[in-house]
Image (cartoon, rainbow, N blue to C red):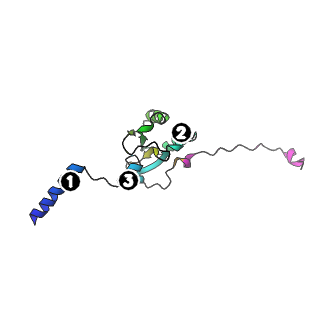
C-alpha cells in the first residue's frame, strides 16, 4: 500500500507543478481584483467613477481604514489618476491589477480597499459615504410668522 500512496503523492505533485497551485474561490477572486469578498472594506465600480461624489467619499472612507491596501483596476489608469495621487500623498499601499480580473465594463470593479485578513463587512459600496446635500431653509423671522398671508 505504500507504493499506492507514494504514487498518488507523486501524481498530485506532478499535477500541481503542471497546473499551478490550486486557488480558493477563483470566481470570487476574478470579481474582486484577485482578492476575496470577505477582505473587502470598500468597493467602487467603473460606473461610480463618473459620479462627482465618489472621490470625496473615497477620501473620507480611506481615513477610517488605516491598515487597508488599495487595489486599482489597471485598465482604467487615466480615470484612476486622482486616486493614485491620494494614495501616494497619504502613504496608502496600492497595487495596479492588470490581469484577467480587471475589466472595463460598467459593473466591474474599479478600485477596492482591502484588509489583509477577513473582515466580512456587510455594506462595501462607496455610495454609503456619499453626502446628501440639502439646501438650508431660509430662516423665518418672528414677524413673518405673524403676518403670513395665505
Check residue 27 in the rendering and tell me which mark sits there, or answer none. 3
| Left or right: 9, with 29 as reference point | left
Q: Quick one: label 1, few (<14), some, or many (20+) residues within 10 Å?
A: few
Q: Which residue sits at x=43%, y=40%?
A: 72
Query: Which residue is more in the foreground, 35 or 113?
Result: 35
Name the secondary structure under disc 2.
Answer: helix
- Magenta region: 127-150
Q: What main secondary structure does the magenta stretch of the protein show?
A: loop
Query: Which residue is more in the foreground, 142 or 134?
Result: 134
Q: Which residue sits at x=41%, y=51%?
A: 39
Assign the N terminus to one quadrant of the image. bottom left
Sequence-first disc among 2 and 1: 1
| Left or right: 80, with 2 as reference point | right
The image shows residue 13 at horizontal and vertical percentages of 18, 54
Sequence-first disc among 3 and 2: 3
Name the secondary structure under disc 3.
Answer: helix
Sequence-first disc among 3 and 1: 1
Check the image and report above or below for 111 versus 13: above
Residue on which disc 2 sits? 55
Amino acid at each position: 500500500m505504500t507504493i499506492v500512496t507514494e504514487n498518488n503523492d507523486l501524481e498530485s505533485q506532478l499535477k500541481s507543478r503542471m497546473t499551478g497551485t490550486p486557488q480558493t474561490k477563483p470566481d470570487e477572486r476574478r470579481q474582486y481584483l484577485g482578492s476575496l469578498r470577505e477582505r473587502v472594506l470598500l468597493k467602487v465600480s467603473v460606473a461610480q467613477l463618473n459620479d462627482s461624489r465618489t472621490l470625496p467619499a473615497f477620501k473620507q472612507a480611506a481615513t477610517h481604514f488605516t491598515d487597508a491596501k488599495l487595489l486599482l483596476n489597471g485598465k482604467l489608469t487615466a480615470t484612476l489618476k486622482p486616486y493614485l495621487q491620494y494614495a501616494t500623498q497619504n502613504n496608502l499601499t496600492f497595487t495596479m491589477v492588470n490581469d484577467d480580473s480587471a475589466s472595463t465594463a460598467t459593473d466591474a470593479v474599479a478600485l477596492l480597499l482591502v484588509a489583509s485578513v477577513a473582515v466580512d463587512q456587510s455594506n462595501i459600496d462607496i455610495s454609503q459615504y456619499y453626502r446628501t446635500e440639502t439646501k438650508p431653509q431660509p430662516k423665518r423671522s418672528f414677524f413673518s410668522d405673524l403676518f403670513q398671508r395665505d
